[in-house]
Amino acid sequence: MSDLLVASNMLLWVLILVLTVMVLALARQIGVLNDRVAPAGALTPTGGPKVGETTKAVKVHDINGVDATIGGERADSTTLLMFVSPTCPVCKTLVPTAMSLAKYEGFQLLFASDGDSIDAHRSYVKDMGIDEDQYVLSEALGMEYRVSKLPFAVLIDSDGTLVSMGLVNTREHLESLVEAMRTGVATIQEYVSSYVSEPAKEA
């Protein structure tokens, strides 16, 4: 009986050692994959205005009836235009991030949407605490930037130049628009692609 217990204990220890080795091997492989995966920035649409072009001036009015012009040649501060919807759950998580980022960078923040009732939008503005920021309803604005999915963000420089835009599902996606503006590269993917291709050219 004792011999059977000793044998079973030895077998268990062998299994534990094998599992430990497998876990370490998997952890190492995860680390390798993490190094190989390129950073993901905001997904930029293929259609619509191009980064680096002067944006078209679109006249809109907010939910309070105040007229506003978005894009075009302007002399104001850089504008962060955030397309959201009261029915978009991801938008609700990114609205505070957009507010924080705009305040930190000194951007003018403007929220845009369309559809639903005006009361639904007013309630959304109140619930999200964005009363101090302009909130416009305009289908034409979404069509101008080819917005097909939400949340979607557009960054327009003080001279009216489109510096970056794309679908933003995370804080990192939103911050990638700012990095694109600072580096002069349209997307993070474009930057990584050019960085990877340089050694190949030298070789």
Image (cartoon, helix red, strand yellow):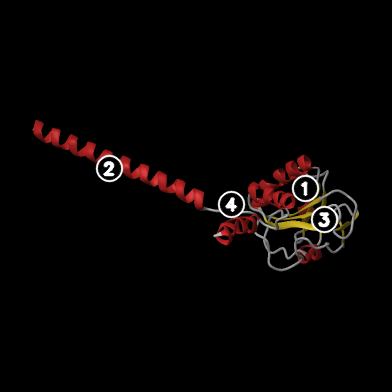
Q: Amino acid at mark 3?
A: Val
Residue type, label 1: Val
Identify the disc placed on residue 39.
Answer: 4
Is 92 or 14 nearer to us in this picture?
Answer: 14
| Quadrant of res 149 | bottom right
Residue 154: x percent and y percent?
A: 75, 56
Residue 125's tag is: 1
Left or right: 23 as drawn, with respect to 116: left
User: Marks 3 and 4, Cα distance to the nearest angstrom?
Assistant: 32 Å
Q: Dividing the picture into quarters, in which one does residue 151 lie? A: bottom right
Which sits earlier in the primary sequence, circle 2 or circle 3?
A: 2
Residue tagged 3: 136
Q: What separation in Å lies between label 2 and label 4 (alpha carbons)?
A: 34 Å
Kindly check if marks 1 and 3 are in contact, taking CB atoms under 8 A apart as contact. no
Residue at position x 60%, y 53% in the image: 40
Of 136 and 155, nearer the camera is 155
Residue plotted at (55% across, 60% down): 200
- The residue identified by callout 2 is 18
Mark 4: which amino acid?
A: Pro
Q: CA distance from mark 2 to mark 3?
A: 61 Å
Closer mark to the observer between disc 3 and disc 4: 4
Q: Residues within 10 Å of mark 1 (few under 14, many from 20)?
A: some
**What is the spatial separation of the Cα atoms under label 1 and label 2, in whole angstroms?**
56 Å
In this view, the residue farthest toward the top is 2
